[in-house]
Image: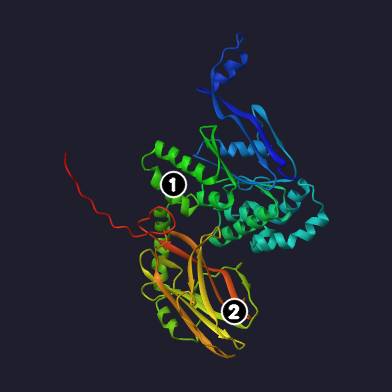
Amino acid sequence: MENEELISVKKVSKVYRLYDRAIDRLLESVSIRKKSYHKDFFALQDISFSVKKGEAVGIIGTNGSGKSTMLKIITGVLTPTSGSVETKGTVCALLELGAGFNQDYTGIENIYMNGTMMGISKEEMDKKLPDILDFADIGDFVYQPVKSYSSGMFVRLAFALYISIDPEILIVDEALSVGDVFFQAKCYHRMDELKKKGTTILMVTHDLGSVMKYCDRVILFNKGEKVGEGLPGEMVDQYKKILAGKNPAAEKFVDEQDFLGDGTTAGTRGQEKAGQANEEVVESESSKDAETDLSRLMKDEMSINPSAQLYGNGKAEIVDFGIFDNEGKLSNILIKGENFTIRERIRFYDNIASPIFTFTIKDKRGMDLSGTNTLFEGENIPAVKAGDEYICSFTQKMNLQGGEYLLSISCTGFEGGEHTVYDRKYDITSITVLSNKNTVGIYDMESKVTLERHDA
């Protein structure tokens, strides 16, 4: 039913009693005059909002503003001090890592146990198990006790389990910030599918890019109170003002957070990757030879996405590809401000009138950030016949901000006026950009600053 409210929160407050000394709790409980020895702390104060069927709603706010507490109350983990919460339909909540998992059970045992708790029969879980294991992609660890899992494995298994049952309401609390860029991209893609199918999504995140892309509406919390509710852009602007008011340097911090989207600033990420970058140079010492040596595969030195989407009619195939840094070495790690080259080797299995070679760079939420193709660049490729090969190189300057990205490549064309895909490899590999200076937004316009001082 249209406009049906699946989540209704009415005047919810959550109050914690704070005691200066441990003995004060006892003194208060035995006081004949009911003397108070505590101070009330309002984690949430008089919060009201609703989420309608099919909506994607985000809750944002600074640390300690009550976002996670609100989700725990909605899911029944916590009880409100006052007010009420009503939910309709199947609710799946991905909250704290490992919540709902028995640490001594194996991954398989936890899958069936959680399925039973959600009212799903063993026969239904048997049918869903292959898809769950395929999405989680944790290998034989699924037969090990989950207490041996890393945080990333917890999220992989939990997310795979919860989305497999096609919930009516999906609640996510920062969990998608764990895991590699490929898994995060796969999760966002699945959330996109759920949203299109009408699943109601309520998410708490510091990733403002996800808020802007996925949410229809955003609720802003601050110090336990709801200070705003409205369109994503408006609420993100208010959030930035709150941060800037708390800390003059916060405006720059949140802009870095907007892009990286995982609670890691660009500077920290750069330090983490610096060592890897040095190793990459050593390991790829001879990779420049791969530019001309067709007997060696460039992609063997690339980080390949095991969950990449591959499709096409098979008339052509991108048999090899690579990313070359400014020094001509194969590497997934690039330096902001330096030139780099994306090279594709295409083999043809049929006659094609005018093929087109492409590349696209996306963020991990699936948003196209940049890309081009031979048609855009004015390179009209003449007809090819079966057995021909082309090596296509795109060279450009890396102006994207520091962070992690995904690369897609394809060979397409037009047949009978219809766009035809011969081979497309979505999110086939990653690009990590290292930067010692990030600006606002997605890319750097390389602004030049000129100052003139005129004293009073």
Assign a secondary structure to mark 1.
Answer: helix
* Between marks 2 and 1 in the image, the one whose residue lies nearer the viewer: 2
Q: Nearer the viewer, residue 296 or 456?
A: 456
Farthest front residue in view: 417
Percent position of residue 420, x then y: 62, 77
Residue 137 pos. (x, y %): 64, 62
Task: Say which residue label 2 marks.
Answer: 414
Q: Where's the N terminus, which quadrant? A: top right
Name the residue nearer the viewer: 308 or 217.
Answer: 217
- Residue drawn at x 50%, y 43% is 234
Quarter of the C terminus within the rendering: top left
Q: Give the image location of residue 368, x and y in percent.
A: 52, 62
Amino acid at circle 1: Val
Q: Counting other residues with Cα less than 10 Å from the Cα at mark 1, is it few (<14), some (14-19), or many (20 or more)?
A: many
Residue at point 41% right, 47% down?
A: 253
> Which of the two residues, 424 or 2, is positioned nearer the viewer here?
2
Q: Earlier in the sequence, mark 2 or mark 1?
A: 1
Under mark 2, the amino acid is: Phe
The secondary structure type at the circle numbered 2 is: strand
Q: Which residue is mark 1?
A: 254
